[in-house]
Image (spheres, rainbow, N blue to C red):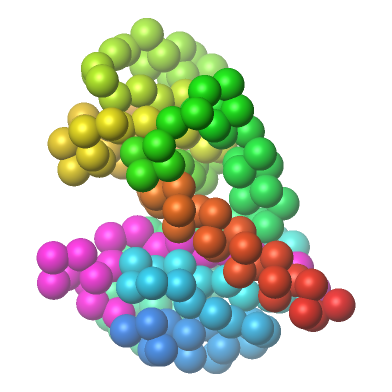
Amino acid sequence: MNTYISILRGINVSGHNIIKMDALQELYKSLGFKNVQTYIQSGNVIFQDTSSDIQNLEKKISEKITVTLGLKIPLLVKEISEFKEISRHNPYLTGRIEDINHLAVTFLSSKPLQQDIDKISTLNFPPDEFIINDKAIYLFCPNGFGNSKLTISFFENKLKVHATTRNWKTTIKLLEMAEKILSESK
């Protein structure tokens, strides 16, 4: 049984794309997923399934949300191992020690092309900073994320991949929940 974390983008924001977490949990269970848990109201779902085809899981969940709730919601599914790697390699916590309240991760659907990374790697938006590492972008926004130009749209347009962002506390909490589910299912 594989343990996954799915992160939906743009739900329950400013009264748009409203999805109750208990309804989302039932939707995932109806797909045959096991040990389904949600975390906060922003569309974070931990679940287990025997499938190892992430693209198929994303398609299956997306179609079910569209059919059941009538919403077209972008989402990413990540393996627990990817969350572990991301948590271990945050450059703002390994080479520097920044306030975690100013850190976030933008998760990418795939690794961007090097030529697209090169185009934005020299761009600066002080005091905000970003570091791209494989399928994650680490963000440091000391004045808050709402004031930053480092938005999901910016990264999607420049890197030509789908993305969604979670603050660092949520990222770590999702990893902890997934690890607990994994240990309890053994």
Quadrant housing residue 141: top left
Does the segment drawn in magenta span residue 119?
no
For residue 151, side relative to residue 7 (left or right): left
Position in image of residue 111 (x %, y %): 56, 33
**Image height of 156 relative to 19, above or below:** above
**Magenta region:** 1-19
| Residue 33 relative to residue 108: left or right | right
Q: Locate residue 3, reporting x and y percent.
A: 70, 67
Q: Is 3 part of what is drawn in magenta?
A: yes
Image point (40%, 25%), residue name? 130
Residue appearing at x 65%, y 67% in the figure: 178
Of residues 129 and 24, which is closer to you in this image? 129
Residue, far right: 186
Residue 163 in the image: above or below residue 156: below
Task: Check the picture and name the quadrant holding the N terminus.
Answer: bottom right
Task: Between residue 69 and residue 18, name the one nearer to us.
Answer: 18
Taking the image as shown, residue 147 lies to the left or right of residue 12, namely left
* Visible residue check, residue 156: no
Along the viewing direction, whichever of 148 and 168 lies nearer the viewer: 168
Could you tell me residue 60's position as x and y percent?
54, 72
Prevailing SS of the magenta stretch: loop
* Residue lying farthest to the left in this orientation: 14
Indicate whether 60 appears above or below 149: below
Residue 37 makes an appearance in the image: yes
Give x and y (percent) for residue 38.
48, 77
The residue shown at (54%, 80%) is 37
